[in-house]
Image (cartoon, rainbow, N blue to C red):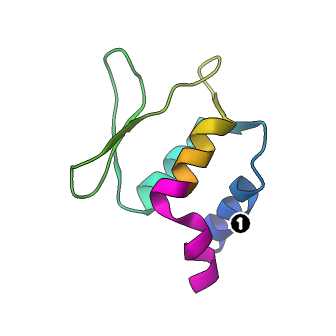
Amino acid sequence: MSKIRKLIEKLLLLPTSTDIEDVIKIYLFFGWTLRTGGKHTNILVSPDQTRTRAVPTISGRHVKTHYVKTMIEDLGLREYLEAQ
């Protein structure tokens, strides 16, 4: 739990480039599932199966800030930290 909290705090600072593994860890922690393959290599599906997010990478490893902002809104990360 502590590692996830530190990772969320780091991502809320909106770094210019984030590792895809960090993004996937956060989504998985909140119950999303990872589906791979096809045109988009990283597709995340919400727990209720109503939303999907394709997360493209730069050079196969990094994610742009825009996708981190989308993740923060999707998962309500600011509210999650305030509730802790």
Q: How many marks can you see?
A: 1
3 vs 67: above or below: below
Q: Label 1: which residue?
A: 6
- Give percent across and percent down for residue 2: 65, 74
65 vs 80: above or below: above
- Give percent across and percent down for residue 78: 62, 69
Magenta stretch: give its range.
73-84
Taking the image as drawn, is residue 1 in sight? no
Secondary structure beneath disc 1? helix
Seen from this angle, which residue lies furthest bottom? 84
Taking the image as drawn, is residue 58 in sight? yes
Circle 1 residues within 10 Å: few <14, some 14–19, many ≥20: few
Residue 47 included in the magenta stretch of the image: no
Is 17 situated left or right of 36 in this image?
A: right
Residue occupying image coordinates x 68% and y 38%: 65
Residue occupying image coordinates x 45% and y 61%: 29
Residue 77 included in the magenta stretch of the image: yes
Quadrant for the C terminus in the image: bottom right
84 vs 20: above or below: below
